[in-house]
Amino acid sequence: NCNGHVISGGGATVWPGVDTYSKTFRQMRGISVENCVVIGWKTGIWTVELNESTIRCNVIDGMTSSGIVLISAYNNRVNYNFISDSSGTGIELDDHASSKKGFANKIESNVIVSTSNGIELANTNNNRIVNNLIEDVYQGIVAYETERNVLSKNTINRSSSIGILVQDSNVTTIADNKIDDAGYIGISIEDFFGVSSFNTIKGNSIENTTFVGLSIVGAPGASGYNVLYDNVVCSADRA
């Protein structure tokens, strides 16, 4: 527990402010990173193979890359963090293909302002992204090559490109999110290198998108078996 201590990097371009990775003790667990003020590093909080741990109530500002990064991490809670003015992603989860039941990581009740992407999932499964506030970003929430993730009850305001992007991902639940003022598309399901199927998009509210409210893009027949219902799209050039 930092107890509000300021960890300042002075604009460092190489190191993270907080690093939990240990080459000696792999798969560390039971760690708590709380109440830290991290300013001016490459990455705010960097973790590799961190399990059953908590990252909460931290303030992260002015990173040259991402705010919080979890690589090959399982069963962690990341909540009540404030991340702002960073060149990379607010919260990034990468490189975890869990076959275990349940949810790998829960990203909940964070505030992310003025980053590139708000929250990014890449090759990571069984996560819950719930009740986050994301504003003034390029893309709100993005998921690449993932499965069985839940994106629910998030509020995304003023994404200059896409509110929620799910690409080459399957069995994603996108539910009850509020997206306002997306510069291009509110919610987009896309095939790029693979196929996006068996995704459920329900109960979302999308307002004031510049181009399209909801989009499913892929080769004919490729993005099949996706379910959409009870979504509300207002003030988009195309639904």
Image: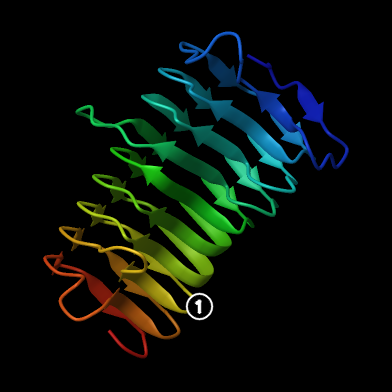
Relative height, residue 73 to residue 69 (above, below): above
Q: Quadrant of residue 205?
A: bottom left
Relative height, residue 39 to residue 74 (above, below): below
Relative height, residue 138 to residue 108 (above, below): below
Q: Quadrant of the N terminus?
A: top right
Residue 133 location (% of width, % of height):
47, 51
Relative height, residue 215 to residue 96 (above, below): below
Along the line of sight, the residue nearer the viewer: 181 or 121: 121
Spot the residue most to the right: 10
Mark 1 — residue?
183
- For the point 85% across and 42% down, which residue is it? 11
Q: Residues within 10 Å of mark 1 (few under 14, many from 20)?
A: some
Can residue 57 be seen here? The reply is no
Residue 60 location (% of width, % of height):
67, 38
User: Across the whole image, how many numbered discs are drawn on residues?
Assistant: 1
Along the line of sight, the residue nearer the viewer: 69 or 210: 69
Residue 96 location (% of width, % of height):
39, 35
- For the point 47% across and 59% down, which residue is it? 140
Decide if residue 91 is on the left or right side of residue 18: left
Spot the residue most to the bottom: 237
Spot the residue most to the front: 193
Q: Quadrant of residue 7?
A: top right
Q: Amino acid at mark 1?
A: Gly
Decide if residue 162 is on the left or right side of residue 13: left
- For the point 15% across and 67% down, which residue is it? 230
Q: How is the image coloured?
A: rainbow
Q: Secondary structure at mark 1?
A: loop
Can residue 208 be seen here? The reply is yes
Q: Quadrant of the C terminus?
A: bottom left
- For the point 30% across and 49% down, which residue is it? 152
Residue 98 location (% of width, % of height):
30, 32
